[in-house]
Amino acid sequence: MERIDGKLFKDMLFSGMNCLGNNQARIDALNVFPVPDGDTGTNMYLTFSNGVNEALKTDSDSVGKIAKTLSRGLLMGARGNSGVITSQIFRGFYQAVEDLNTMDAMQLASALVNGSRVAYKAVMRPVEGTILTVIREAADYTYAYAVTNDVQDCIEVMAKMVEEAEISLNTTPDLLPVLKEVGVVDSGGAGLLSILEGFLSAMKGDVIQADASAQAEESAQAKVEGEGEFGFCTEFILELSEQGMKHFSEESFKEELATIGNSIVCVQDEDLVKVHVHTLEPATAVKMGKRQGRFMKLKVENMSDQHDEILSKEKEELEELSSEHKKYGLIAVAAGEGIRDMFKDLRVDVVISGGQTMNPSTEDFIEAIKKLNCDTIYVFPNNSNIIMAAQQAGAVMEDRDVRVLPTKTIPQGMAACIMFNPEADADDNQADMEEAISNVKSGEVTYAIKDTTYEGLDIKAGEYMGIYGKAIVVSQPDMMEASKTLLSKMLDEDSELVTLIYGEDAMKEQAEELAEYIEEISSAETEIYSGKQPVYSFIIGVE
């Protein structure tokens, strides 16, 4: 095959999207941290499918014009760091083929190399052993091979690209020790390899279709997670029947629940089973549980109503904001009605619904920025996996002064907002807020979604983990004990104020118990808030 035309290029994109989607769950499972999060496979699939679906709508048969639409769609739909990097790879690819109606083997190889270069430039401090390494090594070796051997066959170029990407992916644990400890390869690199494998398959005449079982799971993901935390948060504790004790399997029950939802936790302790699932079919989840035994506890909360109410409020507020010119505008990302209200009290104009389990896209930030009629806009992503999408939105809005503060946690975002002074100039404000961010210690308590070992700490699915900064410092079955251990590691003689935000699966009484513990071990004051956040039982800030 000497040239790739527009029709084949579309087939390659469609095949790559489906190959990624079919491997989405496997890629999600490669994540090192055993916490419920946006997941690399999910973020990459939502990003790539947004771009591909836009590209497939184009009437043009020009590779350059299709690639342009793809790049724009990827940019707008980018979620999480892996999604943003993926968008940058294909932005570089587009730049290389912009003027081409069809491309030959060397043009294909050159476009892949340019994709690597652009992706590296987009990351301030590139880390080796990631998707960046995989695209760079694969593209460079492929280009060198094509030049040395005067390759004219596009299929041969892509086959070499897949081969080199797989070799590079398998060496990522040697570059990132944490990957080796957990026993996985880099999840972003695995996602990229799936896309490339889909490309190659289409070039050979076998366009990959969406797998039926993966499609069913993706459908549940798209409804519940892809568009945000909609549906019903369904939790229950089962006492297994005699028959259930004989036949119950955690893995089988998880697989059954996966057909109707996501964010699944299922932990068995002798005759008791704790279950958590986000689904649009709570009645079905309850029936699944009822077949296994008797309910000791059952709770179903409608996230759709909560989300619709939040969106309605946001729409009204944005309509008001767009007509009012101000010197400054503030945008923050948060999950949980209580945390949203806390940011509103701190003069934040727009709170984008999102966080650990639902990373907002670049387009979400752009839409919020467009609604604000302000001279300078500060953005607080409040999650390390969201910062790049926010920065990408700021770069797109070239006519606006958009400043993304590097807030990686809710406590950092709140500390920055507290320091914001509407009377100060933009640079002084930014400096003061960045200093406040650096003075905050952040901690979270959440549950583990899988068994693993992280930096020597054995972690079991269903246990409560205390996360201090980027490190998991404790993992044990009791939530309160895990929380106290975390606090003991965060507090020292210089600690003055502890902000304690309890989530939807914790109670005020438990927060008060932790406040008493703080008083016992330090002289710091404690402020308690109801954040109503998902995922995290407690979010802790220490200043």
Image: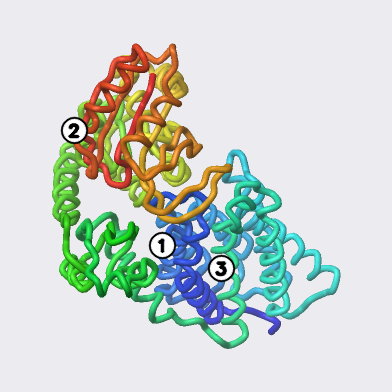
Circle 3 sits on which residue? 64
Q: Amino acid at mark 3?
A: Gly
Relative image position of residue 91 (x, y in whole percent): 55, 57
Query: Circle 3 — which element?
Result: helix
Circle 1 sits on which residue? 46
Q: Is residue 395 visible?
A: no
Q: Amino acid at mark 2?
A: Lys
Q: Quadrant of the N terminus?
A: bottom right
Cα separation between marks 1 and 3: 23 Å
Q: Nearer the viewer, residue 186 or 271?
A: 271
**Do the numbered discs 1 and 3 sit on residues whose CB atoms are within 8 Å?**
no
Q: Quadrant of the C terminus?
A: top left
Q: Amino acid at mark 1?
A: Leu
Q: Which residue is painted at 63% across and 61% down in the image?
A: 96
Q: Which residue is most to the bottom?
A: 205
Query: Circle 1 — which element?
Result: helix
Viewed as shown, does residue 391 lie left or right of 153? Answer: left
Query: Circle 2 — which element?
Result: helix
Circle 2 sits on which residue? 508
Q: Which residue is most to the front?
A: 242
Of pointers 2 and 3, the one earlier in the residue sequence: 3
